[in-house]
């Protein structure tokens, strides 16, 4: 008698398990309780009960999302969810009432990702967004983020009466001209050697402006 009871219990558990698998999803898919099939146009149809085609496993993928976007003095970062393979990101900056491409970044293609890319701001307010292009040609856009880049202080130099060298307050491009406005020296750096200049008055072009100095 005990043996028969045990057998009934096994049959009951097997039936319960089969019914459960008809309605409970597993992995990234879902086992449809009603048999379905796809036609050539990709549309889903149910089958008649008399049809012998078995149920199929249908996979559902989550929609791509930007989970966060931020910008600092040196970096722009963003996080994604449900990213797919062969996607591409584009960093864009607003300019003259339109969006201009700054640089492109290849997608990692994993479910969740974090990106960090170096960025060079223009002076003043900078507005950025990230554009994502998936493998099917569909675009997604991040929220706009802003960063205000403070203007650098004007470059200064010393001395005004030069013996051998001019020193600048920060690295800058420069030009030294004679009285006839002929360029004698040009370059970029924190200082410029003036030892070979003859005694007299010269013009110094730095930071978009013109200054004067006297070579002793």
Image (cartoon, rainbow, N blue to C red):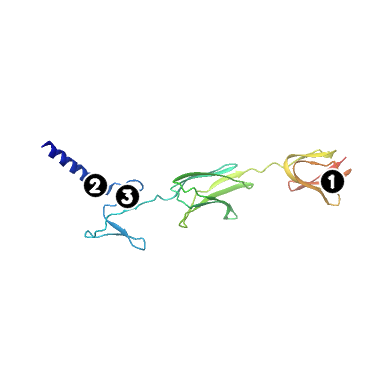
155 left or right of 95?
Answer: right
Residue 100: image location, x then y, percent: 58, 54
The residue sitting at the front extreme is: 3
| Dot 1 or dot 3, earlier in sequence | 3
158 left or right of 138?
Answer: right
Q: Identify the secondary structure beneath mark 3.
A: strand
**Residue sitting at 24 percent across and 44 percent down?**
17
Q: Identify the secondary structure beneath mark 2.
A: helix
| Dot 1 or dot 2, earlier in sequence | 2
Q: Which mark is residue 94?
A: none
Determine which residue is flagged by label 2. Answer: 18
Near mark 1 (Cα within 10 A), the count class, few <14, some 14-19 or many ≥20, is some
Camera-side residue of 157 and 86: 86
Distance between mark 1 and mark 3 Cα atoms: 81 Å
Camera-side residue of 175 and 34: 34
Residue 153: image location, x then y, percent: 70, 41
**Residue sitting at 59 percent across and 48 percent down?**
126
121 left or right of 108?
Answer: right
Determine which residue is flagged by label 1. Answer: 202
Residue 174: image location, x then y, percent: 76, 46
Determine which residue is flagged by label 3. Answer: 30
């Amino acid at each position: 008698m005990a043996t028969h009871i045990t057998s009934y219990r096994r049959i009951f558990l097997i039936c319960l398990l089969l019914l459960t698998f008809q309605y409970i999803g597993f992995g990234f898919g879902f086992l449809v309780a009603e048999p379905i099939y796809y036609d050539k146009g990709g549309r889903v149809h149910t089958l008649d009960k008399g049809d012998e085609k078995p149920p199929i496993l249908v996979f559902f993928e989550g929609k791509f999302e930007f989970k966060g976007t931020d910008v600092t003095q040196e970096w722009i970062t963003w996080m994604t969810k449900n990213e797919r393979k062969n996607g591409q990101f584009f960093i864009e900056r607003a300019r003259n009432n339109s969006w201009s491409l700054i640089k492109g970044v290849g997608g990692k293609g994993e479910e969740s990702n974090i990106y960090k890319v170096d960025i060079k701001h223009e002076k003043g307010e900078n507005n950025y967004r990230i554009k994502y292009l998936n493998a099917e040609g569909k675009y997604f856009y991040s929220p706009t983020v802003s960063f205000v880049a403070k203007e650098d202080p004007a470059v200064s130099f010393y001395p005004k009466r030069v013996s051998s060298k001019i020193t600048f307050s920060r690295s800058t491009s420069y030009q030294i001209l004679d009285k006839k406005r002929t360029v004698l020296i040009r370059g970029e750096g924190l200082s410029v050697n003036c030892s070979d200049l003859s005694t007299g008055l010269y013009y110094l072009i730095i930071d978009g402006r013109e200054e004067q100095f006297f070579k002793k």
